[in-house]
Image (cartoon, helix red, strand yellow):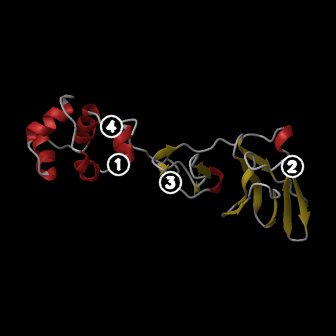
Amino acid sequence: MDQYVTGTIIRKLRESKHMTQSELAERLNVSDKAVSKWENGKGYPDISLIQPLADVLGISVIELLQGEAVINTNRNFNMRNIKFYICPVCGNVIVSSGEAMISCCGITLMPAEAEEADEEHTASIEPVEDEYYVHVDHPMTKNHFISFIAAIGDSGYDIMKMYPEGTADCRFKRSGTRYICYYCNRDGLYKVPVKRRK
């Protein structure tokens, strides 16, 4: 764990809830002197108190440890705000329709920033009847490969897992698809808009 909850954060969050040190102490079944020590940097809450402390302060443990609350300003579900969180340890992919606090394998994940395709990561998107055939030109070796390809539409997404030493191609329904995203395990996330034909 790179960080641990600080007294400044405890004080700030406690005050935002309009609680006294005594009220916080009572809810955690500790002394008000203990809370005072935490807030003055003379001690830390016991690890067994982290979850109850986060619950009383109305935030997640991750937010408490990071020292800030995550407020998602995306109050409406909107696929334009889709975020991909990819774990560098296990390769897990978590998708959110907006900013979120995501962790995997003990790591807080940041959303992958999509880039325009470069010469080493070109994608072809061909309409075939009611589908798009997507192919990413990539060597797909054991150590350098496309991990997934996703089709993002107006009302949802479809994601296909790719495997090393395989081919980076798949098919998606054309209806509503706005853009294609694909993730290279070495170079990151790429995004290509779908050119619609009338």
Question: Which amino acid lies under the numbered mark 4 shown in the image of this protein?
Answer: Tyr
Q: Quadrant of the C terminus?
A: bottom right
Identify residue for label 2.
137
* Residue 19 numbered tag: none
* Residue 75 numbered tag: 3
Q: Say if mark 3 contacts mark 4, CB within 8 Å.
A: no
Residue drawn at x 34%, y 43% as measured from the top left: 64
Distance between the alpha carbons at the discs numbered 3 and 4: 30 Å
Question: Which amino acid lies under the numbered mark 2 shown in the image of this protein?
Answer: Asp
The earlier-in-sequence mark between 3 and 4 is 4
Q: On screen, 35 above or below 98?
A: above
Identify residue for label 4.
4
The earlier-in-sequence mark between 2 and 4 is 4
* Camera-side mark, 3 or 2: 2
Q: Say if mark 3 contacts mark 2, CB within 8 Å.
A: no
The earlier-in-sequence mark between 4 and 1 is 4
Where's residue 13, x and y in %? 27, 40
Distance between the alpha carbons at the discs numbered 1 and 2: 42 Å
Residue drawn at x 11%, y 51% as measured from the top left: 29
Question: Which amino acid lies under the numbered mark 1 shown in the image of this protein?
Answer: Val
